[in-house]
Amino acid sequence: MLLQVKNLKAYFPIKGGILSNTSGQVKAVDDISLNIERGETVGLVGESGSGKSTLGRAILQLVSLSGGLVRFNDVPYNSSRKDAKKVQMIFQDPLSSLNPRMTVGAAIAEVLKHHKLVPRNKVMHRVKELFRMVELSPEYIHRYPHELSGGQCQRVGIARALSVEPELIICDEIVSALDVSVQAQIINLLKKLQKDKKLSYLFISHDLAVVRQIAHRIAVMYCGKIVEYGDVNSIILTPFHPYTKALITIAGEKGHLKDIMKPGDIANPANLPEGCHFHPRCPVKDREDKLPDICKKLYPDLIEKIEGHFVACFQQRK
Ligand SMILES: Nc1ncnc2c1ncn2[C@@H]1O[C@H](COP(=O)(O)OP(=O)(O)OP(=O)(O)O)[C@@H](O)[C@H]1O
Ligand SMILES: [Mg+2]
């Protein structure tokens, strides 16, 4: 197992009142377990605010953990250790993570020098090699970030991540701001790099239509919890959770979740409903007149519906 996440929790205090006392907490990541094998892509999908980025950051210990553990290559992951760079994260906005006053080639050279990854006289050679890997012509080495398109910037972001020879890359909405055709190019590049280097990805996106193009397995997140996970085909062809079904519908129609689900918005993470977090939006209520009491009182554990495909929904236990 490359990555093992067990019962991970990341809670943020909510400050309120005149004295700024802690008045509650946002359970952004609440008891999540997830594994990633070498060479595997796990897609993480869910609406805005469901906790996807926080999970990525919690794995890297960029936020303080409220519980649980992260093991990498069978030892506890420690962000301060030398091999911590084996896990890299790439973000949605590549421009904001690049220094505007530095050419993109120089930015990558700096990483190589900082980590002493190649002898000083080999740095530029390695930068060119990294540009080739991400299918960017070497002439771009001398460009500044604002002179590149969104897709080219994202390629630089990938090259920079690759420069430290990672084994796992956490991709947080990295194609979300790009045109569909450019999205497809970046996804194909990621797949090719995965094959060549046996890389693993945690691929985060709110768009299931994007995630299914790259993921081997998909985990669906809602209000800090994984509500369903399984092989990509199993999830797409036989979804069990009403939330997953809704995500599939909007992925097909490019519509909005709010148009097909009622009532209202994603639950307020600072004030989650009792029972299943999804119950106020659950369509079962409309079909069967009334939602069973258990859905309003208890949170459902994940159960295995078919081999390797798990769901957290009381309706699926009948
Ligand atoms: N540093 C923080 N302090 C307090 N609350 C936070 C912090 N970071 C995230 N949150 C809260 O945790 C919840 C999950 O946020 P997160 O950014 O992980 O969601 P997301 O699924 O990545 O959403 P998006 O699709 O918009 O990126 C949200 O309610 C958010 O407001
Ligand atoms: Mg996010």
Image (cartoon, helix red, strand yellow):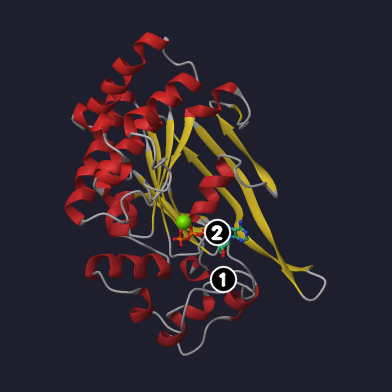
* Residue 263 percent coordinates (x, y): 46, 84
- Element at label 2: strand
Q: Residue at x 67, y 46 (%)?
A: 64
Residue under label 2: 225
Task: Classify residue 145 as left or right of residue 180.
Answer: right
Q: Which numbered marker is on residue 277?
A: 1
Q: Quadrant of residue 202?
A: top left
Q: Disc 2 or 1, which lies upstream in sequence?
A: 2
In the picture shown, does residue 177 fall above or below 36?
below
Residue 164 visible in the current orientation: no
10 Å neighbourhood of mark 1: few (<14), some, or many (≥20)?
many
Task: Classify residue 234 as left or right of residue 298.
Answer: left
* Residue 79 percent coordinates (x, y): 61, 32
In the picture shown, does residue 22 fall above or below 153?
below
Mark 2 residue type: Lys
In the picture shown, does residue 297 fall above or below 182?
below
Q: Is 93 in front, or is 34? A: 93
Q: Residue at x 51, y 34 (%)?
A: 3
Do the numbered discs 2 and 1 sit on residues whose CB atoms are within 8 Å? yes
Q: Furthest-bottom residue in view?
A: 289
Q: Is 160 in front, or is 176? A: 160
